[in-house]
């Protein structure tokens, strides 16, 4: 998979990939797409779809890991005591 802009080697972001996919889709839906360009545009769309799916998967994994870390954290850990002690203390 290639997550680089053709020719310049810079990584393409998710929003830019989606925007490029929208342009390709408009081209494919149009009546004036050159048959010689069709395969190249479909290939590029495939690369962009793979890139976007990978970014979504990584984001889901990151969010799941962050949530799991939050669920493991308890106020008692921050205070150095027992969670039951915190519930008994007045505010």
Image: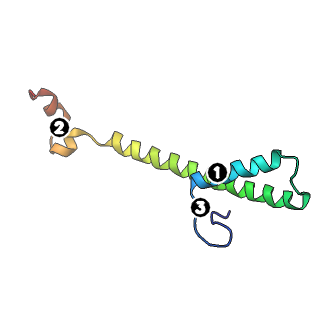
Q: Say which of 4 and 83 sits in front.
A: 4
Among the 4 quarters of the image, the one containing residue 77: top left
Q: Name the residue under label 1.
A: 19
The first of marks 3 and 2 along the sequence is 3
Q: Name the residue under label 3.
A: 12
Q: How is the image coloured?
A: rainbow
Q: Local crowd at mark 3 within 10 Å, few (<14), some, or many (≥20)? A: some
Among the 4 quarters of the image, the one containing residue 44: bottom right
The first of marks 2 and 1 along the sequence is 1
**Residue 82 shows which numbered tag?**
2
Residue at image location 26% in from the left, 40% down from the top: 74
Residue at image location 80% in from the left, 55% down from the top: 42
The relative height of residue 8 versus residue 85 in the rendered view (above or below) is below
In which quadrant of the rendered image does the N terminus lie? bottom right
SS of the residue under disc 3: loop
**Residue 78 place in picture, x, y as percent:** 19, 45
**Residue 38 place in picture, x, y as percent:** 85, 57
- Cα distance, mark 3 to mark 1? 11 Å
Between tags 3 and 2, which lies in front? Answer: 3
Q: Is residue 81 left or right of residue 37?
A: left
**Residue 34 shows which numbered tag?**
none
Among the 4 quarters of the image, the one containing residue 72: top left
Residue at image location 9% in from the left, 29% down from the top: 89
């Amino acid at each position: 998979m290639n997550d680089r802009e053709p020719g310049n080697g810079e990584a393409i972001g998710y929003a830019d990939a989606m925007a490029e996919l929208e342009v390709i889709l408009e081209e494919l839906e149009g009546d004036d797409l050159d048959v010689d360009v069709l395969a190249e545009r479909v290939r590029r769309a495939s690369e962009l779809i793979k890139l976007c799916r990978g970014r979504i998967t990584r984001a889901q994994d990151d969010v799941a890991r962050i949530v799991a870390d939050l669920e493991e954290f308890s106020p008692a850990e921050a205070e150095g005591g027992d969670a039951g002690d915190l519930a008994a203390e007045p505010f």
